Image (cartoon, rainbow, N blue to C red):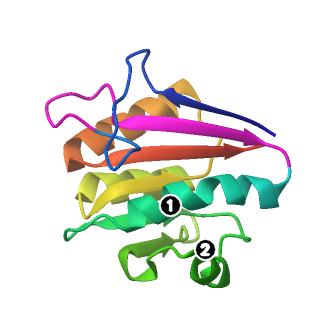
């Protein structure tokens, strides 16, 4: 199992709830990426504490998962101890990409963190950073290899 966490820019990122902090005046740390390779069960095991902590955030904003892997379902959420009352799981409509849905969720600002599961190019990263900045949200992209 290999994993890596990187910011969309070479800037460093600090901790929010031990994970991510987006400076309200800066776009540098609006997108973080986590790359996991290995078995899907081990990858989910590594994601569990992060999602549990993000779902525990108090306030009126959601933790939103965009097109999560099939293994990350309601049963998994229940067993993992993630606060299911603070999570939205969204799947793109026909004709809509996961990237477009993630952008929309970020731009609306109803989520403190939007988690996507995609292999992003630099243009897609830029789009997510812009949307997160507009919505004062944090984007986390998880790449499962």
Residue at (47% x, 33% y) in the render: 125
Image coords of residue 69 (percent x, y): 69, 64
Residue named by callout 1: 51
Residue 119 vs residue 133: left or right?
Answer: right
Residue named by callout 2: 80
Relative to the observer, which residue lies in front, 22 or 45? Answer: 45
The magenta-colored residue range is 22-38
Residue 119 vs residue 92: left or right?
Answer: right
Residue at (28% x, 49% y) in the render: 137
Residue 10 in magenta stretch: no
Q: Secondary structure at mark 1?
A: helix
Q: Find residue 18 and report its image quarter.
A: top left
Specify the farthest residue to the right.
39
Specify the farthest residue to the left.
25
Image coords of residue 130 (percent x, y): 31, 36
User: Against 35, is 73 above or below?
Assistant: below
Residue at (33% x, 31% y) in the render: 14
Q: Residues within 10 Å of mark 1 (few under 14, many from 20)?
A: many
Relative to the observer, which residue lies in front, 21 or 139? Answer: 21
């Amino acid at each position: 199992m290999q994993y890596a966490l990187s910011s969309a820019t070479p800037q460093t990122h600090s901790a929010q709830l031990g994970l991510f902090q987006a400076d309200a005046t800066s776009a540098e740390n609006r997108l973080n990426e986590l790359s996991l390779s290995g078995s899907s069960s081990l990858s989910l095991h590594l994601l569990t504490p992060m999602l549990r902590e993000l779902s525990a955030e108090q306030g009126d904003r959601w933790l939103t998962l965009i097109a999560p892997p099939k293994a990350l379902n309601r049963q998994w959420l229940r067993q993992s101890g993630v606060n299911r009352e603070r999570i939205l799981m969204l799947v793109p409509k026909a004709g809509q990409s996961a990237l477009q849905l993630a952008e929309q969720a970020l731009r609306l600002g109803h989520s403190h963190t939007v988690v996507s599961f995609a292999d992003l190019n630099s243009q897609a990263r830029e789009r997510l950073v812009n949307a997160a900045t507009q919505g004062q949200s944090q984007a986390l992209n998880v790449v499962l290899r």
